[in-house]
Amino acid sequence: MTDVAARATAGFRSAYGQQPAGRWAAPGRANLIGEHTDYNDGFVLPFALSLRTVVAASGQPGERWTVWSETTDQPVEFGAAEADEPGRVTGWGGYVAGVVWALREAGYAVPGARLAIASDVPLGSGLSSSAALEAAVLAALVDLGGLDLPAERRPRLAQRAENSYVGAPTGIMDQSAVIRCREGHALFLDCRTEAVEHIPFDLDAAGLAVLVVDSRAPHRHADGEYASRRRSCEAAASALGVPALRDVAVADLDTALGRLSDDETRRRVRHVVTEDQRVLDTVELLRAGRVREIGPLLTASHASMRDDFEITVPEIDTAVEAALAAGALGARMTGGGFGGCVLALVEAASAGAVADAVTHAYAERGFAAPHHVTVLPAPGATRLP
Ligand code: GLA
């Protein structure tokens, strides 16, 4: 397939019969560690992928937005009335309308625009295709309108599009990752303060690779399960009398668990509190250049998601087990759960063998063949030359 930026440009030309004024790209992301901690005001450590969504765009008069996408080839068009009513534009167009809504809500004069979208980020695989779309559209509208919106304020706005217009109660991680990540680094984000630190994550220098396996497991009830995990965490925080589970220190975990009567809630809390600590421990190791040693933390994170937070599925657990058995230094599901992708930290030379082992384990279990790709930390959203 041709390059994603070339496809967005070609799509723009055929949909609108002219050249776009510019092109803006935003990547998908993988989360190295820190799952379901973002909406608990905790810590996450994602990095951007070189798989990207590109939006080719030009201004158009009036408050009208026309959006073509290569995945449907069916333009979606909406005006201010539809943009101002959350939920009115549905499907993938809702993410675009949501960004227009969030900007208008924040008082920006959003320029009318024609947009054409192409993407290499697989949809529904837990690699944040929606955040990539939001971030690329946001960058395009900000530049086309000459709006004053610095990069550090963009994640919240894109998140509002997703939470309030589309109606998905997600945290701040994905939008922060796709907007703020840097090449060669993972993004250590404090989700309460939005303070970031770019942590060197130089896989090549360490002779390592990250293998991402798309489990291809159908997302089973992912939206409802995500919302219910979030509700349990919030209820637990309020039962414990803290603003968020981030405020339970790992040293106080046993005391906190002793104050909760319900076993399921206790396990949810234990996942979040220990996961925050695993993020901090991973950051310490990476700061010290001890990349290889983060493997056990990744694997412990997986066990916690599987046993305590209960968000994995058989395909995902199979991929993790097969990768570890084939010599991966660590492996875990990445993203919201109930399907999606696994990432495995492997010796660069053994990436192929680990991938083959996963494929073999899938065949034995009768699962649809997984897809895999090795990835390196890539830059966040940007305007293309
Ligand atoms: C999804 C959400 C994020 C985060 C992760 C789980 O990707 O969009 O906000 O909660 O799940 O870590």
Image: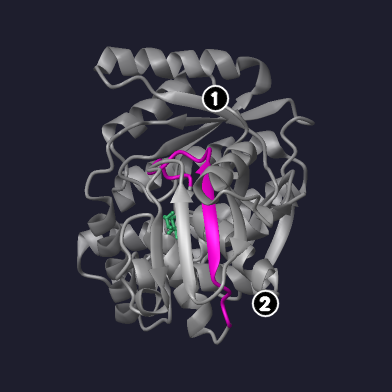
Query: How far separated are the C-alphas under marks 1 and 2?
Result: 46 Å
- Please say whether residue 248 is visible from this viewpoint: no
Assess whether residue 86 is covered by the magenta stretch.
no
Q: Which residue occupies 46% across, 56% down?
A: 67
Q: Nearer the viewer, residue 266 or 29?
A: 29
- Please say whether residue 117 is visible from this viewpoint: yes
Q: Is residue 228 above or below residue 13?
A: below
| Residue 50 left/right relative to 331 | right
Q: Nearer the viewer, residue 132 or 57?
A: 57
Name which of mark 1 and mark 2 comes first in the sequence.
2
Question: What is the number of the mark on residue 147?
Answer: 2
Question: What is the number of the mark on residue 382?
Answer: none
Q: Callout 2: 10 Å neighbours few (<14), some, many (20+)?
A: some
Q: Which residue occupies 20% across, 65% down?
A: 262
**Residue extent of the magenta highlight:** 109-127
Q: Which residue occupies 38% across, 40% down?
A: 340
Question: What is the number of the mark on residue 328?
Answer: 1
The quadrant of the picture showing ligand 1 is bottom left
Where in the figure is residue 79, as x and y percent of width and height?
41, 73
- Kind of residue indicated by mark 2: Leu
Assess whether residue 116 is covered by the magenta stretch.
yes
**Which type of secondary structure does the marked residue at label 2 adopt?**
loop
Q: Residue furthest bottom?
A: 107
- Kind of residue indicated by mark 1: Ala
